Image (cartoon, rainbow, N blue to C red):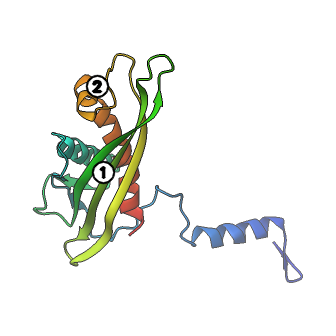
């Protein structure tokens, strides 16, 4: 309501709502700023430069699953027919003991660090939308009590095969919003 050239309570609220609704603000990670023509995203199997078997398959599938959960895109297992393609290379997977048991001084908690590099390219416009020469993900991981020698990654993955799936899922949950909204 306007009285003598001034806005009153309900009019101020309505005016602010109108201004804010058109400003483009959104919650981080919930928006999508990709070009509108991108409907199909190709996610070929990531290149694995580590000595750990299946790391490429596990991380690739976690990212594909996270992209599919957005329900806005079709995800292809390769670049054929894709509007955009995500290419990643897993450079390394390292561990660092961050806690030990008080009695036996065996590892009880480790930090796993994955280093990747890659890009996300708009195929139609031949334009790189997102690129990271070094992408680092660090995740603390509590070793299950039945895992022995957990300081060695190979034995950890044999004794706790779901460890990599959990780590890959967390990686995908951080990577996908970055790709979709920060290019």
Of residue 85 and residue 143, the one placed in the foreground of this image is 143
Q: Where residue 172 sits in the image (x, y, percent)?
A: 34, 48
Location of residue 80 by image quarter: bottom left
Which residue does the numbered mark 2 point to in the structure image? 160
Which residue does the numbered mark 1 point to in the structure image? 67
Which residue is at a point 18% across and 52% down the rendered structure image?
49
Of residue 13 and residue 23, the one placed in the foreground of this image is 23
Please determine whether, in this image, residue 14 is positioned above or below residue 2.
above
SS for tag 1?
A: helix
Q: Horizontally, is 54 left or right of 8 in the view?
A: left
Query: How many numbered markers are drawn?
Result: 2
Q: Where residue 24 sits in the image (x, y, percent)?
A: 53, 70
Query: Which residue is at the far front?
Result: 104
Callout 1 environment at 10 Å: few (<14), some (14 to 19), or many (20+)?
many
Foreground disc of the pair 1, 2? 2
Q: Where residue 170 sits in the image (x, y, percent)?
A: 38, 43
Of residue 12 and residue 113, the one placed in the foreground of this image is 113
Which residue is at a point 25% across and 45% down the rendered structure image?
59
SS for tag 2?
A: loop
Q: Where residue 95 sits in the image (x, y, percent)?
A: 35, 40
């Amino acid at each position: 309501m306007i009285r003598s050239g001034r806005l009153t309570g309900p009019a101020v609220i309505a005016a602010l709502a109108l201004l804010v609704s058109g400003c483009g603000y959104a919650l981080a990670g919930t928006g999508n700023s990709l070009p509108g023509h991108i409907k199909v995203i190709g996610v070929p199997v990531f290149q694995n430069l580590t000595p750990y078997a299946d790391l490429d398959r596990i991380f690739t599938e976690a990212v594909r699953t996270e992209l599919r959960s957005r329900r806005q895109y079709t995800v292809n297992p390769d670049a054929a027919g894709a509007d955009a393609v995500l290419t990643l290379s897993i450079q390394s997977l390292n561990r660092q003991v961050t806690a030990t048991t008080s009695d036996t001084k065996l590892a009880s908690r480790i930090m796993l660090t994955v280093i990747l590099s890659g890009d996300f390219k708009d195929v139609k416009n031949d334009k790189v939308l997102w690129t990271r020469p070094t992408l680092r993900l660090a995740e603390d991981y509590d070793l299950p009590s039945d895992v022995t020698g957990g300081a060695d990654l190979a034995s950890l993955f044999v004794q706790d095969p779901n460890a990599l799936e959990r780590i890959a899922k967390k990686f995908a949950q951080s990577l996908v919003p970055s790709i979709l909204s920060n290019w």
